[in-house]
Each structure stands twice: as C-alpha cells, then as structure tokens.
Amino acid sequence: MSRVLNQPVFGEVTAARRPSGYRRLISFTVLLTFALIMVGAYVRLTDAGLGCPDWPGCYGTLSPFHAKDQIAQAVAEQGGEHGPVSMGKAWREMGHRYVAKLLGLLIIVIAIIAWRRRQALQQSPALPIALVGVVILQGLFGMWTVTLLLKPAIVTGHLIGGLLTLALLVWLWLRQQPAPRYVDAEPAAALRGAAVLGLVLLSAQIFLGGWTSTNYAALACTDLPTCQGRWWPDMNFADAFHFMRELGKTGDGENLPVQALTAIHVMHRIGAVLVALYLGWLGWRASRTDGLRPLGLALLTVLAVQFALGLSNVFYSLPLPVAVAHNGGAALLLALMVVLNFRAHRARLQI
C-alpha cells in the first residue's frame, strides 16, 4: 500500500519547518555552481587556462591588474596575444578562480550550518561535510591544472569534480523540499533501477565529453554521420586512452597522432547515441508515470537540445557559444537525472 500524503521520511521535519535562509543559501549555491561550470567551459574553450601561469594568484599578485607588467612581458616573449598569456585570458582565468573561491566559502558555510543546526534540521550533516572535501579536492585539481600545464587527465578530473559538486548540491537541495505526492508511488519507485543505470551511463558519457574537450579532439571528425568520410576511420585507442600523459603527447612523449584524436571523438559520438537512446526511453517512461510527468518531459527536452548542440558543434566547427552551451546542457542533464533518482528513491520509501 502506498502512502499518498505528504509525509516526512525517516523522521525528517517538513520543508516548511526548515530554516528558509538555509534553503535559499543552498539554492543560490546550486545556481552558482552551474554558472561556474559554464565559466570554466568558457575559460577552457578560449584557451585561457594558463592565462595566469601560477596559482592561486596571478604572477604572485591578487589580480591581472596588479600583474600587468609581467603579463606584458610574457606577451612580448611569446610574440603576441595569440599565445597562452594575455590580459584578456588572465582576467578570464582569475574570474573563474574568484567565483570558485566564493563557491568554496558558501559550501563551508552550508556545512557549518548543517552541523550546528543538525538537531533542528533533523538531517545528517554528512553530505554537506562531504561537499567540503570535494571542494578541497577541486581546489587541488585547479592548482594542478595550471602547475601541470593542462594535463588532460587533470583537466578532465577538474571538470568531473565540478559536475560532482553540482550533483551533490542538487541532492542536498532536494532534501530541503517538500516530499513529493503520489496517487500511487509504486510506478515511480519501479524506475529506481533504470534511473541509477541512466545516471551511470550519463556520467560515463560526460567523462568522454570532457576527455574529448581536454584533448582538443572535438574537430577530429568534421562530417556527419561519417567521420573523415568513413563509418570506421583509422583509430589509435592505445594512445587515445592512455591517461597519464602530457597534452598533445603519447605516453612515450611523442606527438599524439591524429588517429588517437579520432578514436576519442568517435567514442564520444557512439556514447552520445547510446545515452540518447536510453535517456530518451527513460524520459518517455517518466513522462507516463504519476508524479514524474513534468520531470520526464524536461528530461526529453534537454536531451533533444543537447543532442542538437552536439551536432551543431561538428556542423559549424565548434562555435564558442554552442560549445559552452553544450557543457551547460550536460550539467542540466546531470541535474535532472539526480532529481529523477531522488524522486524514485523517495517513492520507494513511501511504498
């Protein structure tokens, strides 16, 4: 028999009784995390990751304004602003760092509130505390991104860490909301296994997308639906997925062959088709399930837009707004899949 009333689970207080300031703080932090992911994509796609080649400041100063002489010298030494350092790239890189520091501070505040008010909230502070650990690790990845000169494994790890932060914050935000109402919770609960698998598949595809971006393999194939005029072009998987190597190099230090970039791109394409099919089916199922219809429709809509953005990146040779939006679409899909998993989990508790 399903519980159909808005009843708390595991003794949690209702959302109406939780401090509204705490809920608003988490909501703002979720939005800021999404914005930071977009900013990070913009920094990476404009080759500004080494705009300030040290960490955490810019040439040992607080801002590019204070480092203008060092930046001017670096621009002169590299023969113009086409290189990794310029005033614009420095400001983009430092802007990303400023927002990241604000995000880290907000997550620390959330964790402190969650710990000090755990009795009033009637929630374990474990998740907010874990988020602090994730943010610390993210800070280290941010430092290594610069000090290790954009090593693909580090940059990809930094991207995954940002999306993990978003996913955990969305889950924390959902815990503060009113419990969902179901006429019958069983159909929603039945989607739990499928939702978990969808989240796993999406996470793998996000990794492939990050690996494609950080290896600059997005334009290894410039035609559709074939690649380089062939359904199965020449590919080098050994070097493509050798993770501990420098940017543009093989594990032996040789220049990374185009066949390796092709392998990365093709695997991302294949993953995109498989994930689109599975999430499309899952979104359709959710749209026909009581209590999940709006969520299912949202999933289908964002999935369609994301697939179109991916095609546009190839058709139009990776235009910056489309490429940045493609990163945002991945983040939105991840957030929606977290919501679906949360709702299916809560539905199961109400049976």
Image (tube, rainbow, N blue to C red):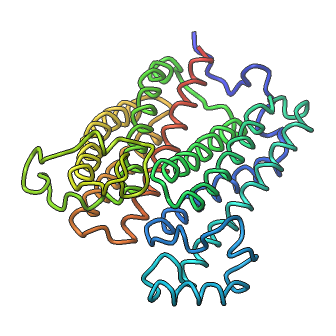
Q: Position of residue 334 (x, y in %)?
A: 49, 43
Tell me: 227 left or right of 59: left
Quadrant of the rendered image containing residue 74: bottom right
Q: How many marks?
A: 0
Residue 64, percent from left and from top: 67, 81
Q: Residue at x 37, y 41 (%)?
A: 242
The residue that appears at 43% across and 54% down in the rendered structure is: 246
Camera-side residue of 279 and 137: 137
Query: Percent from the top left, x then y, of residue 278?
Result: 31, 33
Side (left or right) of 259 relative to 179: left
Is 129 located above or below residue 226 in the figure?
above
Is 156 placed left or right of 164 in the picture? left
Is residue 152 depicted above or below 296 in this figure? Answer: below
Q: Residue at x 55, y 47 (%)?
A: 163
Q: Position of residue 309 (x, y in %)?
A: 32, 59
The quarter of the rendered structure image containing the N terminus is top right
Q: Is 1 left, or right, of 242 in this rendering?
A: right
Residue drawn 41% across and 37% down?
A: 204
Quadrant for the C terminus, please.
Answer: top right
Please, which residue is most extreme toward the top here? 1
* Quadrant of the rendered image containing residue 67: bottom right
